[in-house]
């Protein structure tokens, strides 16, 4: 085995173990090097599944997994997952072998201008020129992936370099341990004074916040300010959803009561969010209240909504300083109306499923809930139907919402030793059948739940004639899963749903439950105002 791949694995493993995902047989040979070194690897049969799994692993561990591809169709097939990592600012290291230097521009096999893909997909792209700069390139790539703006980085390696010998003595470049960007209590005092005067404040937590910071400092801060607390879809899970101050997911998923409260708020503090479009849906005047926008990346300020106070700071540092400044809990009663649970009388349909899952999930040994973003899935983001139990981490698509991401990301979580539940519609399962095969082969401890509403429900809402978006694929999905080594079950009776889900969640290994839904309710309920 060529030494360059062994050396890359050694350099990366210095700062902790990570997942190496790719399709064996495609260059580069880093999957084999990871296997030889005893590192965690995922040998996939499809580059898109490998990319989804790598992003899922990275998001849960906050470290860059490695995605190995070759230039050409191999990399192109993985771009959907890479775009998801870029949008969600998830650390990811993509290693691609290019064509040999002698044939570039001369019709090389599967030649593709991979360096031109950088903008909007990678934080940094670099072609490694020689083995002498290998340690620098790998160390810098890891740093840029995991710190600052964060996201996928791309190292291009020629087969000529892969065949070259390493220097006799390689000198490790020390790993940087940067302090999080911070402000002092003195510089933030004017912001805190203005917020203390607010009577109807809202805290909005995005994907750039950490649950430990929010629980330790954000919850006491909300009590001191008497604030309503919201999360974005990518920030879900950082604020406890069983807390009385939780108002739901911002934008498209926001309950009507919280939407009314947001309309009269006199201060909104946005922490670690780019204020993506779906987070702003239904927020009629986002620039009206005093807006404080806190992020480590100054480029997000004023991009969607002008902020009175743009603050370059780590969200956890801001919360700690703000909580210290705010002092004791407020005695004022909540100024907002709590949302009311939405339930169906007979427990049937899409809402009935999410009600049932919310009832049986607490107490189960489940670490992660991965979720798609199809029509039936959207109701799982809606607090009146379903809230995350304490201790369960979410894995959901970001603004790119690629169909099948949740299922593939769930596999990455399971490969990390997590017990996972993954919920997706039948359309998502059809786009990601290689994931089922890979999960069965790995004997992953994962419970897939397929919501079968008989077709592509979301496109059906815009059509009077749904014939061309209707299909029945549940039997084929079940048959493939069974052949791949899954235990399978199907349920259509609402009375049997809780017991079926409980049995599946308590099981082990790869398993599939098909839940047959007889409805396609439009989302959001009542429409966005």
Image (cartoon, rainbow, N blue to C red):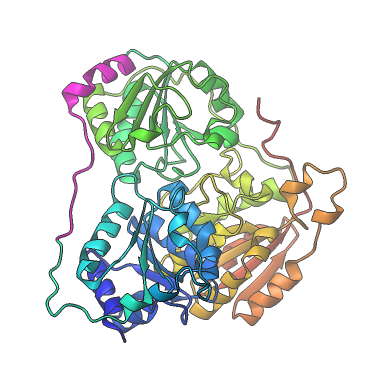
285, above or below 243, in the image:
above
Q: Which residue is drawn at 28% across and 19% down?
A: 191
Q: What stretch is highlighted in magenta?
A: 174-196
Q: State the image coordinates of residue 21 (x, y, percent, origin top left).
A: 43, 71
**Residue 29 in sight:** yes
225, above or below 40, in the image:
above
Q: Which residue is drawn at 59% across and 65% down?
A: 448
Q: State the image coordinates of residue 268 (x, y, percent, origin top left).
A: 42, 23
* Front-lying residue, 196 or 187: 187
* Front-lying residue, 156 or 192: 156
In the image, is residue 195 part of the stretch drawn in magenta? yes
* Front-lying residue, 155 or 507: 155
**Residue 100 in sight:** no
Q: In this view, does 48 lie to the left or right of 104?
A: right
Q: State the image coordinates of residue 60 (x, y, percent, origin top left).
A: 39, 57
- In the rendered image, the quadrant that contains the C terminus is top right
* Front-lying residue, 22 or 117: 117
Q: State the image coordinates of residue 500 (x, y, percent, origin top left).
A: 64, 64
Residue 379 picture quarter: top right
430, above or below 518, in the image:
below
Residue found farthest to the front: 106
């Amino acid at each position: 085995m060529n030494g360059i791949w062994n050396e890359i694995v050694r350099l990366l493993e210095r700062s902790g173990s990570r997942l190496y995902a790719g399709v064996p047989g495609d260059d580069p040979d880093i999957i084999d090097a990871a296997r030889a070194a005893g590192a965690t690897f995922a040998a996939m049969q499809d580059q898109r599944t490998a990319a989804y799994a790598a992003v899922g692993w990275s998001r849960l561990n906050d470290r860059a997994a490695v995605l190995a591809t070759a230039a050409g169709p191999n990399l192109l097939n993985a771009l959907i997952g890479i775009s998801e990592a870029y949008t969600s600012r998830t650390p990811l290291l993509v290693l691609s072998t290019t064509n040999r230097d002698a044939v570039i521009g001369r019709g090389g096999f599967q030649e593709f201008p991979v360096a031109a893909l950088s903008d909007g997909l990678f934080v940094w792209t670099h072609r490694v020129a020689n083995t002498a700069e290998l340690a620098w390139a790998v160390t810098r790539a890891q740093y840029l992936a995991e710190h600052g703006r964060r996201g996928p980085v791309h190292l291009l390696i020629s087969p000529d370099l892969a065949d070259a010998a390493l220097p006799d003595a390689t000198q490790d470049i020390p790993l940087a341990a940067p302090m999080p960007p911070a402000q002092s209590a003195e510089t933030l005092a004017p912001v805190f004074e203005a917020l203390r005067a607010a009577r109807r404040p809202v805290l909005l937590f995005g994907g750039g916040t950490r649950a430990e910071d929010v629980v330790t400092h954000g919850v006491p801060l909300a009590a001191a300010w008497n604030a309503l607390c919201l999360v974005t879809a990518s920030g879900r899970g950082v604020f406890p959803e069983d807390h009385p101050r939780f108002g739901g997911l911002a934008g498209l998923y926001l309950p009507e009561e919280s939407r009314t409260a947001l309309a009269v708020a006199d201060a909104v503090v946005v922490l670690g969010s780019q204020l993506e479009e779906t987070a702003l849906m239904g927020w009629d005047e986002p620039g009206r209240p005093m807006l404080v926008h806190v992020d480590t990346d100054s480029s997000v300020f004023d991009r969607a909504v002008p902020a009175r106070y743009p603050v370059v700071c780590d969200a956890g540092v801001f919360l700690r300083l703000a909580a210290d400044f705010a002092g004791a809990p407020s005695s004022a009663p909540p100024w907002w109306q709590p949302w009311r649970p939405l339930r169906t009388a007979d427990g049937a349909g899409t809402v009935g499923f999410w009600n049932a899952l919310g009832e049986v999930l607490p107490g189960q040994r489940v670490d992660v809930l991965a979720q798609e973003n199809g029509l039936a899935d959207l109701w799982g983001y809606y607090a009146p139907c379903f809230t995350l139990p304490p201790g369960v981490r979410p894995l959901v698509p970001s603004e790119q919402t690629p169909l099948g991401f949740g299922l593939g990301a769930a596999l990455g979580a399971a490969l990390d030793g997590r017990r996972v539940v993954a919920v997706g519609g039948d359309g998502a399962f059809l786009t990601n059948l290689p994931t089922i095969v890979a999960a069965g082969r790995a004997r992953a401890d994962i419970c897939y739940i397929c919501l079968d509403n008989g077709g592509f429900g979301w496109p059906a809402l815009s059509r009077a004639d749904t014939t061309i978006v209707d299909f029945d694929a549940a039997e084929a999905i079940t048959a493939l899963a069974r052949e791949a080594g899954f235990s399978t079950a199907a349920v259509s009776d609402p009375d049997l749903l809780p017991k079926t889900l409980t049995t599946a969640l308590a099981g082990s290994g790869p398993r599939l439950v098909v839940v047959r839904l007889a409805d396609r309710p439009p989302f959001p309920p009542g429409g966005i105002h």
